[in-house]
Image (cartoon, rainbow, N blue to C red):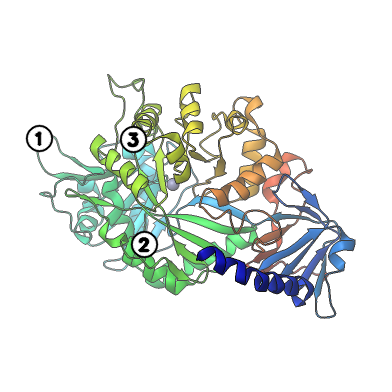
Amino acid sequence: MRMRFIKRFSGILFLVIIQQLKGVSQQADLIFVNGKIFTSDTSRLYVAALAVKGNKVLAIGTNEAIKKLASSKTKTIDLAGKTVVPGFNDSHDHLGWLIPVGKFFITPFSVPGLTKEAVIDSLSRLIKQASAGQWVYGTIGITVLNDTSIRRRLLDSLAPNNPVMLAIEWGHGMVLNTKALREINIADTAPDPLSGWYEREQGTKYITGALYEGAQFPAWQALTVSEPQNLLNALRTHALDEMMLGITTVQNMSATLQGNAARRFFTEANLPVRTRIIPMPGSTDKGRSLAEWNNKNTKLSPLTYVSGIKYVIDGTSLEQTALMTKPYANRDRWFGKLNYPADTIKQILTEALTGDRQLMMHIVGDSATSVVLQLMREMASPQIWKTKRVRIEHGTGIISGAAAQAVRELGIIIVHTPQYGKGATLKTWLQMGIPVAIGPDALINPYLNIMFITTQQTDKTENISREQAVIAYTKSAAYAEFADDYKGTLTPGKVADLAVLSQDIFTIPSQQLPSTTSVLTMINGKVVYELKTKNN
Ligand SMILES: [Zn+2]
């Protein structure tokens, strides 16, 4: 029955296709000519010209071939030799993180961070300026987080009427005062949530104000939404920064906003950059807080969509909370820990196998990495796992040959973070056939990250080429979000997401890379950003 149906209608289908080939569809809306266009498609890596029709790439090729697709209505952009790349896809960012709300101080990234004296000095100054009830926050490093004299009691003496947060800049620990704990309804009787913990004074239930890992979620959200207009402004400013750098997709690990808040703010923000919202559920003592992310509404605005799910499986080596096979040097028999019990990790993997949400896991410790890889092997065959495109964020725990081998077999994607991953065997991963995307974790400048991964790996032989770097940042990044069917390369039929660059990132000296900008950014076939110079 079905066969006969196909036979009867295939003739008509054929005719329609022929008509489309002959007809208006071959005329471009816009053509780029005289360029150095990098496609990220290894079968044809560089072309001189590209045609756009609607929101898609119509054709690529020589100037001559592409000019034939122009009519009198077609707009022509003469690239005058400029370099074009597919729009960068930042595979790991945290939108809303450290936005300007309340009174705050943000220091440049530093592991030790400010001294206690400097923090108290800054806080005291800001508290005087704050209005009643307004949040006061600042970023700290390990020095202050590990100093148990800077806790709730001291902060209360400075700020009895304002919620105060001192947050580790990379997100794995914070200190709050009483007012902030009240804002998020945490009393001393509160049991620890599943995926994190409250530091308590020895032998008592008294919470010192230090919160770790998954215990921080409510505080992040409370701070982030405390001045809603500032949040919207920050999201839009961030999108503009991205467009100025040629970033056309951002994959946002939604830690600062949970389901309902994320949907509300991102719908209203209606961002011009493709924005993938990746649910990052918090937890209570009862378990993971999945209910807020159960909503099936996955398209929040024309370019904003919700998909996948992310869990932070262990901490970082900086707080000594990443689970390692060797004990931390200065502590007796302390190996770090997992943020979830083994049965929850098993449940998370079961959901990845049976559901349709792509699983992403922050895993840092080498022991945490091998625990997860072992569980995956026990639970399903590599053939099944490959279809799931599980991601390991950062990938710093994948150092040994055996772990890398397991990652390859299971089809896991490593979302490499250049700023943390200088010791990674980056080139070896690519040679093994492991898909690698780039997850800058808020250090968004793609050219700075390209400089890191092409010249600054600890082992020089692990530096990759600039072409490989751009492919990881575009084609592989699209693969890493199940979006390679419609974006990631500049090839006919893919969406026209691209950036015309201020300099040739494939040939300039590496130290010049970070100063690169986009001079024209196109998303979905529309020019969304253009640098205006005096000459035009
Ligand atoms: Zn992150």
Q: Are marks 3 and 2 in contact (CB under 8 Å)?
A: no
**Where's residue 340, x and y in %?**
27, 39
**Residue that label 2 marks:** 224
Query: Which-is-in-front pick, marks 3 and 2?
Result: 3
> Residue at (68%, 60%) from the top-left corner?
498
Residue 127 at least partly seen: no
Residue 83 at least partly seen: yes
Query: Which-is-in-front pick, marks 3 and 1?
Result: 3
Q: N-terminal of the two: label 3 or label 2?
A: 2
> Mark 1 belongs to which amino acid?
Gly
Q: Secondary structure at mark 3?
A: helix
**Residue that label 1 marks:** 203
Query: Which-is-in-front pick, marks 2 and 1?
Result: 2
Furthest-right residue in this view: 64
Q: Secondary structure at mark 2?
A: helix
Q: Secondary structure at mark 1?
A: loop
Q: Say if disc 1 is inside 8 Å of ligand 1.
A: no
- Choose between 303 and 466: the one closer to the eye: 303
Q: Is residue 423 left or right of residue 334?
A: right
Gap between marks 3 and 1, in whole Å? Answer: 41 Å
**Where's residue 510, x and y in %?**
72, 40
> Residue at (62%, 49%) from the top-left corner?
475
Which of the numbered marks, if any, corresponds to residue 379?
3
- Choose between 232 and 22: the one closer to the eye: 22
The relative height of residue 124 versus residue 315 in the rendered view (above or below) is below
Q: N-terminal of the two: label 2 or label 1?
A: 1
For label 3, the crowd category at 10 Å Cα-Cα, with few meaning under 14, some 14 to 19 and many 20 or more, is some
Q: Are marks 2 and 1 in contact (CB under 8 Å)?
A: no
